[in-house]
């Protein structure tokens, strides 16, 4: 029989890595601002406007 090595579990969960960098938020905010100009008269523009402002608070 071969012995399988047992994995040692850390006592605390490891911190997840960030998906986006700080620079990404600035790029996303610029992209949303550009898109907002093309949909400014549509009802969903309010949602994108809110997203734009939330992205601004992250930076």
Image (cartoon, rainbow, N blue to C red):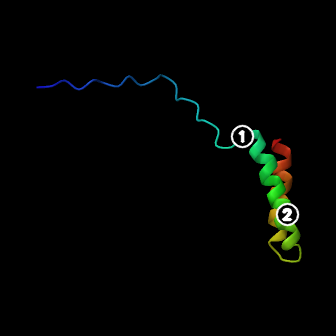
Choose the circle earlier in sequence order: 1 or 2.
1
Residue identifier under label 2: 34
Residue at x-position 88% and y-position 69%:
37
Nearer to me, 28 or 6:
28
Above-or-below relation of 32 to 5: below
Give me the disc on residue 36: none
Residue 14 in the image, given as x and y percentages of width and height: 54, 29
Residue 24 in the image, given as x and y percentages of width and height: 75, 46
Nearer to me, 19 or 12:
19
Residue 42: quarter of image = bottom right
Quadrant for the N terminus in the image: top left
Above-or-below relation of 57 to 49: above
Residue at x-position 77% and y-position 53%:
28
Residue 25 in the image, given as x and y percentages of width and height: 77, 47
**Residue 8 located left or right of residue 26:** left
Nearer to me, 53 or 38:
38
For mark 1, give the secondary structure: loop
Residue 7: quarter of image = top left
Residue at x-position 85% and y-position 45%:
57
Residue identifier under label 1: 21
Residue at x-position 52% and y-position 25%:
12
Q: How many residues crowd around disc 1 within 10 Å: few (fewer than 14), some, or many (20 or more)?
A: few
**Residue 9 located left or right of residue 15:** left
For mark 2, give the secondary structure: helix
Q: How many residues crowd around disc 2 within 10 Å: few (fewer than 14), some, or many (20 or more)?
A: few
Residue 20: quarter of image = top right
Q: CA distance from mark 1 to mark 2?
A: 20 Å
């Amino acid at each position: 029989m071969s012995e399988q090595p047992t994995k040692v579990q850390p006592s605390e969960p490891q911190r997840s890595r960030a998906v986006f960098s700080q620079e990404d938020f600035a790029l996303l905010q610029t992209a949303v601002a550009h898109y907002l100009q093309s949909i400014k008269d549509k009802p969903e523009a309010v949602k994108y406007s809110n997203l734009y402002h939330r992205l601004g608070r992250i930076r």
